[in-house]
Image (cartoon, rainbow, N blue to C red):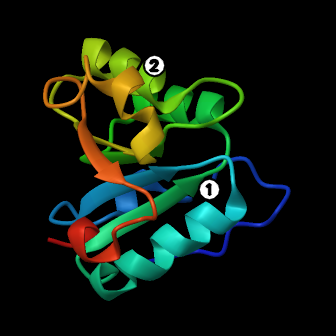
Amino acid sequence: MLRKIPRSADLWMPKSRTSMTGSKKRILLIDDEISGLGQLKSYLATKENEWIIERSNSPQQALQSILETPPTVVICDYDMPQINGADLLRQLEAEHPFIHRFIIANRAEIEVLEDGIGSVFQFLPKPRPGNRLIQ
């Protein structure tokens, strides 16, 4: 159930969450860059029959959505202008510690992230590791 995210859209949400099948895991991808979301979508396309995949290019709206209806997994880019991915995932941990949290960052950003890796979130290196996302 992958949907094309329009350039002007901040967040795609299912029309009716109650109509979703309970057995599918909800995965939320967050990246302020549309190209980054497209790349993540292409990596996860083989799982679209197993997962409900939502994408957001607005970290603030994604955070609000998560707090209202928590997904199973959040995969978030680190480098975003409104709020960095590490801070967003720390907020999620405080509100919903059961959500699986992954951050995508380049090697130069690892030092900044070291305090949160393993406890607050799991690290995925850039360039985006497609094979690691679906394991």
**Viewport quadrant of the N terminus:** bottom left
Q: Is residue 24 left or right of residue 110?
A: left
| Residue in the foreground of this view, choosing between 60 and 125 | 125
User: Mark 2: which amino acid?
Assistant: Asp
Label 1 sits on a secondary structure element that is loop
Image coordinates for residue 12, horizontal then vertical, percent: 62, 56
* Label 2 residue SS: helix
Q: Position of residue 2 (x, y in %)?
A: 50, 76
The furthest residue to the top: 94
List the residue tagged with mark 2. 87
Which residue is at 61% across, 23% downward? 83
Residue at 32% across / 44% down in the picture?
71
Point out residue 96 in the picture as x, y percentages from the top left corner. Answer: 25, 23
Inspect this view and state whether residue 31 appears: yes
Q: Left of 110 or right of it: where is 21?
A: left
User: Which disc number belongs to residue 67?
Assistant: none
Q: Which amino acid does label 1 sit on?
A: Trp
> Which of the 4 quarters of the picture holds residue 134?
bottom left
Callout in the foreground (1, 2): 2
Q: In which quarter of the image is the C terminus?
A: bottom left
Q: Of all residues shown, which one is farthest toward the bottom?
A: 46
Up-down: is 45 above or below 113? below
Q: Contact, CB < 8 Å: mark 1 with mark 2?
A: no
Per the rendering, the mark at residue 12 is: 1
Q: Nearer the viewer, residue 133 or 10?
A: 133
The number of numbered discs placed on residues in the rendered structure image is 2
Let me know if residue 13 appears in the view.
no
Look at 36% across and 25% down and name the residue there. Answer: 111
Q: How far apart are marks 1 and 2 (CA)?
A: 22 Å
From this view, report whether residue 69 is shown above or below residue 105. Answer: above
Crowd tier of the residue under label 1, counting other residues whose Cα lies within 10 Å: few below 14, some 14–19, many 20 or above: some
Of the numbered discs 1 and 2, the one sitting upstream in the chain is: 1
